[in-house]
Amino acid sequence: MASNLNPSADLSDLDYDDWHDCEDCGGSGQDDSMCECERIEDICFCAVPTPVRCDTCRGKGGWHIDRAAEDQALHEADNDRA
């Protein structure tokens, strides 16, 4: 079973060069600077803090870069100069 983080090798249809790790969570998908209880309380007293989902990548650890959209934008920019 594949995780929701960087795709594993068994998913052959995905290109690893197009995966970008989230800078805010380092690709983990979790914000280690905050515990779930801190959404309600100001201070965490948990023996084992539970990290919250990263807001930037929404817990996925990163995102796929759509090279086709970039290529299309470059193509349109080149054709607009004519």
Image (cartoon, grey):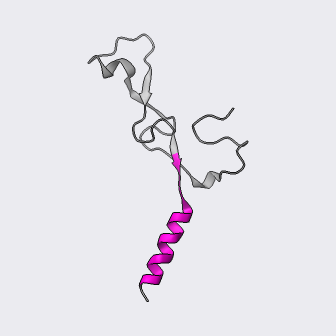
Please name the predominant secondary structure of the magenta segment in the image.
helix
At 66% from the left and 51% from the top, the residue drawn is 14
Using the image, determine if residue 57 lies above or below residue 48.
below
At 30% from the left and 18% from the top, the residue drawn is 40
Please state the horizontal and vertical placement of residue 78, each as a whole percent of the image: 47, 81
Nearer to us in this view, 35 or 3: 3
Which image quarter: residue 5? top right
Q: How many marks?
A: 0
Residue 39 falls left or right of residue 23: left
Using the image, determine if residue 16 lies above or below residue 60.
below
Residue 10 falls left or right of residue 49: right
Residue with the most extreme left position: 42
Nearer to us in this view, 8 or 45: 8
Tell whether position 3 is magenta.
no
Please state the horizontal and vertical placement of residue 3, each as a whole percent of the image: 62, 34
For the N terminus, the quadrant is top right
**Residue bounds of the magenta highlight:** 63-80
Residue with the most extreme bottom position: 82
At 43% from the left and 89% from the top, the residue drawn is 82
Using the image, determine if residue 58 lies above or below residue 35.
below
Please state the horizontal and vertical placement of residue 13, each as a whole percent of the image: 69, 51
Which image quarter: residue 45? top left
Please state the horizontal and vertical placement of residue 22, each as a whole percent of the image: 47, 44
Tell whether position 68 is magenta.
yes
Residue 79 falls left or right of residue 42: right
Nearer to us in this view, 13 or 18: 13
At 45% from the left and 38% from the top, the residue drawn is 58
